[in-house]
Amino acid sequence: MSTLLSSKNENLLNYINRFLEETRGLSLFEAFEWIFKAFENPIIISSNNYFLAPHSVLENPNTHILRGNNLYQLTELKFNKVNNHFMEHEMISLFKMDDIPEKGSNQIENIPLTKNDFAIFMRTWIALECLAYDKKLLSNRYSGKLPIIQYQMVKGQFSEAIIKIYSIINNYINGNTTLENKSFNVFIHNEIDDCMNTLINLTGGHGVLTETVSRKIYLSFVIKNLFVESE
Amino acid sequence: MNIEKINAFEEAIKSYYQEFRDIGLIIDEQPDRLHEFTDLASVQLLSRMMIPSEYNDHPFIINNTKFYGLTCIERVIGTEWLSYGDAGVVVGCPGPSLSGIIIQDFADEQQKEQYYSKLLSKPCWTFFALTEPNKGSDAMHIETNMKKVNACDGQRLLNGEKYFIGNGTRAEIGVVFARTTTGPIGIEMCLIEKDSDGFSAEALDTLGLRAPKLSRLTFQNVRINEEQIIGRHLSPLKRGMHGAITVFNKMRPTVAAMALGVSQATYDYMITNKKNLSLDQQQKLEHFQNELITTRNLIRQAALEVDINPRNGYVGSIAKVRATSLVKQITQYALDLFGEGAFFEHPYLNKWFRDAFAFENMEGTSNILKLNIFQSYMNGKISYV
Ligand SMILES: Cc1cc2nc3c(=O)[nH]c(=O)nc-3n(C[C@H](O)[C@H](O)[C@H](O)COP(=O)(O)OP(=O)(O)OC[C@H]3O[C@@H](n4cnc5c(N)ncnc54)[C@H](O)[C@@H]3O)c2cc1C
């Protein structure tokens, strides 16, 4: 994808392009691992009080937690696992941190990936995964003689979802408004919510089964709740 | 039923929601534990709703009026308040539910006796099995079949699979839709007990509305006698798929009422627990309050219309499309309002968020209902427009 007005660094743009391409069809924890392992040492990006971690990354003693621009070693932090059946099934655990020291052992000047970037990466990826799931599901389900995906109303809804996803990625990659602008960041995530709601409706009853996309959908909203500061 | 009686019914039923609220989270985590709570007054009340007076010695009595839950207006009011407690428990409760409408409207005396006597003997779950793994909205083309064993007697063999069936693993008895021949009138309904040879049920894991344990039912050469076919005494046009359409028209306002109950619960939770609202937040809550009023007005109107004529389905469609959209918006907004960690620090908000997705698919998806609304408009059926 060519960039027009980019004020972001090229590395980050290449990074999201690579992420969206290389993680297509992977499971949730593999997508997480991809992000966290892309740093020299695995780094888990936390929200103010919580972090989500694939089991494998936590097992690595070199793993760090990035909170704002503070980098903590795991041993520097106190954290408790939050009971969560749906994410555990995806091999991802959620932790709540306590008594967080104000400063980590390292501070990073130029944060390679902020929590806002992380939230957009993951939620866009989940939306694309759901879109692909719906495309496959509704191409193979029939209403009368036509695949459901061929009904005008359904095509319209797919387009609505595509319009939102395209706008989100375009804003991120080509836009010159930063995600650090809170209202803009919230706006983008509300657009992702709309897109997710359209895609969930399209899955029909299959969308409520945990074995399909519903855990990904759940996690998309969890990420918003943890990482996006509401206005 | 006059307005005073309906108001008295509503006042009385309100007091039952708390028991459902108290057990909602427990059942959400462990749906099998619902069996432990069948003695609760609220569960008993709901499980006797929709059992007609001939079979029901314990109706809900208020000021000497007996309520059997046989009208849609009773059902929407009762369901809204009990879902305000917990919608999962409402759908997971023992009792007639969807199949009850089929039995009441289409079954013969012997079938009614068989069905209701089971329901009265102990807490008894029922099922209504129409949807299949490959056929949901397009129910006219279901594939489960019920073929004659030989031409001379009435014996048939039922084969096929049903999917997303509420309470399928714990039900004692239920109604199955199956094809006896091609075309829309080639679909029949039959009454089946769980211990029939060749019948099995397996639970499906769901994100929300976990109490009813949606399930996959499998029928492998299940023998069906002529006496099990529901509506034999009626013309083919007045049974079979006509039964499904009647159920959906009569129960759609009730599903909308479930979504409304959850929406109201979420709204009240926000008002009670969130202090120091900003101006924007206050405005948003006012907007939701107006949405709640609008949706409730529609649901109650839909119920009254359906009670006059079950073919008046379009108001129920309008009400359900609004209610399912509202419940998603409000439950998602509540998580935003409480901010970081609300998913885990407010377990009810987490549950309501998950439950909200399920209503969309019960008794018709929004797309199908919108098509129905459009068709009603084109046929000149919609009042005011
Ligand atoms: C909580 C819950 C409880 C349920 N309980 C029962 C039960 O007890 N008994 C039972 O029989 N079933 C039950 N169901 C199943 C339910 O009836 C179906 O999920 C529903 O009919 C939708 O069918 P589907 O899931 O196959 O989706 P599909 O029909 O495959 O639809 C998928 C998507 O395509 C859209 N679509 C399909 N056809 C068209 C069209 N022609 N034009 C435009 N859009 C279209 C739909 O709106 C939807 O968005 C339950 C489902 C849920 C979630």
Image (cartoon, coloured by chain):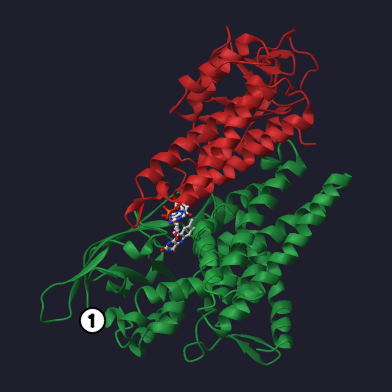
Chain colours: A red, B green
Answer with left or right where residue A58 lies relative to residue B179.
right
Asked whether residue A43 is in view, the answer is yes
Q: Is residue B111 above or below residue A13?
A: below
Q: Nearer the viewer, residue B97 or A159?
A: A159
What kind of element bears circle 1? helix
Query: Which residue is depicted at the point 55% across and 40% down?
Result: A161
Q: How many marks?
A: 1
Residue B15 coordinates in the image, percent (x, y): 71, 72
Ligand 1 positioned in quadrant: bottom left
> What residue is pinned by disc 1?
B226
Residue A54 coordinates in the image, percent (x, y): 53, 25
Answer with left or right where residue B75 lies relative to residue B156.
right
What type is the residue that disc 1 sits on? Answer: Glu
Q: Nearer the viewer, residue B37 or B136?
A: B136
Q: Is residue A37 above or below residue A92?
A: above
- Quarter occupied by the N terminus of chain B: bottom right
Answer with left or right where residue A127 lies relative to residue B236.
right
Query: Which residue is depicted at the point 63% across and 55% down?
Result: B325
Residue B183 coordinates in the image, percent (x, y): 27, 69
Characterize the local packing of mark 1: few (<14), some (14-19) or many (20 or more) Cα atoms within 10 angstroms. Answer: few
Query: Which residue is depicted at the point 73% across and 30% down?
Result: A185
- Quarter occupied by the C terminus of chain B: bottom right
